[in-house]
Image (cartoon, coloured by chain):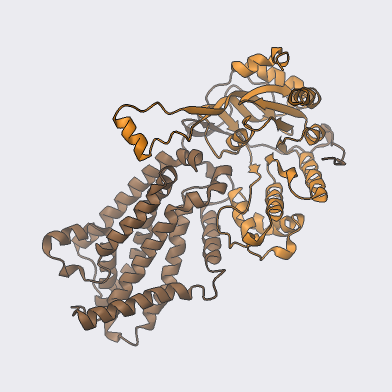
Amino acid sequence: MQHDLPAVIPLSKRRMRPLPADFTHRTSRGVFHGPLPGAVQGTDAGAVSAAHSEAPDEPAALVSRQSLLQVLWVLLRTEFRARYRAQALGIVWSLLNPLVMMGIISVIFTQLFRSTERYFPIFLLIGLLTWQWFSTSLNSATAIFVSNADIIKRTVFARPLLPISSVLSYGINFLIESVVLLAFIPIFPGAFRLSPALVMVPLLLVITVALISGITLATSVLNVVYRDVAYLVSTSLLLLYWATPVFYPIDVIPFPFRTILQANPLAGIMTALRLAIMRGEFPTPLGWAGILIPTVLALVIGWRVFRHYEAMVLDYV
Amino acid sequence: MSELELHPSESVADGPPPMELSSNTSASSEGFASQPLIVRFADVGKSFRRFDYQPFLLRNLLLRITGRAHKPREFWPIRHISFDIRRGETVGVIGQNGSGKSTLLRLMAGACYPSEGVISVRGRVAPLLALGAGFHPDMTGRECVEVNGTALGLTRDEIRDRMDQILHFAELVDFLDTPVRYYSSGMLARLGFSVAVHTDPDLLLVDEVLSVGDHSFQQKCLQRIQDIRASGTTILFVSHDAHTVRQICDRVLWLRDGKLLRDGDPKIVLDEYIATIG
């Protein structure tokens, strides 16, 4: 390659930019911020040794001027927009899927088997929408580091944001799909109860985000090291579908098994959503325990697993 | 080849004498000695498990339980690397395939952690991204700039202000709303280069970019690199192409088999390099 190169600017003519005082020090034991030990600015340094500052373990992404919320917003918006770009019907597909399911299952359970639920279609739709959010975001967030290997490999990225943004973008889907639910109000006016318990709905959505985020923080990093995890997740979802009261009320389950189901946080969330919307009731103390304890556990364990495997992700992805 | 290794840098390759090295460094890039440090590699090594050994596979697990497994083999793409880079320097990194250039770059970008030693970097670092792969193939060029600019640490306002410049430089103004999966590899590479050089980095990491694009675009990239140098940005320039390295760089690091073989004046190091590889 022959290029006519513009003349090199002499050093004295360059506009040297000021540098921050603190370095980012990367070692096998983690990331630290602080000045270079033993080095006076602009002079040759003496001994080179491991550097530690008072604030260890600070995520590297905080060094830059951007805020994590902004990063999350950009990720969220692009993922959401790009997902529906190549489809003629776009989001209509994700509305259609639960509606068709609702139609089929409603026919089966109201005509063939008698359901005890009076407003079975609404009952079912709430379950199906929540389930669809849970399963699609778990599947896609688990694979997120493998499918975004390139950016992970080259930049200091706020890595936990990737699975979380995936969960949130499917959460937006959920909200849009919930419009269908509103369309049913004139058809089944008795199925909806305007009551103070409706404040539970946004609260439960936040809890759902926390729950799925906790689970996917763990599964997304583990999937990099063991690619089996993605398969494990989709198989578990198949099992969990039947262990979650999507199309049956939890009361129909006989007692010893019902306790097991109540430990399933998704079951708790679904039941609480239905209670709030259809009956205007708040969850029972046991219901709260079944929602909050597993969610907090998922967040704590998910975060710890994430931190433990984060460095490995960079080597394996 | 064997005579070359008799130089004092032999000790650089084998042991980690940081004192000796830093004095060597400042001698090789005279004018920069008074500039503050921006990068320091102190006895850095990176090891990977070799992928012929997969400890998690069922077969290997069984072997391990029955006690017939061999220990995981480690592979060190680079080891015992020590050098300093001062503000404003343009440092070339040369070496043949497998000499550890890319690992060095990834370590400097902070995209992986060293297994040994300390890497100290300050300021905003901009690695050139290979765009396209990753994220959503249905992202448009504009969204691609947003996501990658964000990944490089730009705020939304900064991205908005530079969007036109970035797309104009990449010569992709007509394709800004086209999904990137319809982009050619050359278009993606141009966009990647354009995003990175418009981030106002303190340290720009350039990896083999000039192998893509036609001659006039390469010329434009070189011009841009010169402008960036003038603004005091430090550049690490990884290339196989000795000619461009000679033109641009103030200093050259020569890597071989994961060791720092030479560190010094481009003329001297490159002549040796060319003589060695034939």
Residue at the (11%, 62%) spot, across then down: A255
Q: Farthest left residue?
A: A255
Q: Quadrant of the N terminus of chain A?
A: top right
Q: Quadrant of residue A241?
A: bottom left
Is residue A173 shown to the viewer in this render?
yes
Of residues B58 and B4, the one nearer the viewer is: B58
Left/right of residue B73 with respect to residue B60 in the rendered view: right
Of residues B15 and A105, the one nearer the viewer is: A105
Q: Which chain is brown?
A: A
Q: Quadrant of residue A81?
A: bottom right
Residue A54 on image: x %, y %: 48, 32
Q: Quadrant of residue A102?
A: bottom left
Figure check: B91 above or below A161: above
Is residue A118 shown to the viewer in this render?
no
Left/right of residue B43 with respect to residue B274 in the rendered view: left
Residue A38 on image: x %, y %: 59, 21
Residue B12 on image: x %, y %: 64, 17
Left/right of residue B151 with respect to residue B51 in the rendered view: right
Residue at the (63%, 60%) spot, across then down: B180
- How many marks overall? 0
Tint applied to chain B in the drawing = orange
Residue at the (46%, 30%) spot, across then down: A29
Residue B116 on image: x %, y %: 51, 26
Of residues A234 and B193, the one nearer the viewer is: A234
Q: Farthest bottom residue?
A: A186
Residue at the (47%, 42%) spot, across then down: A313
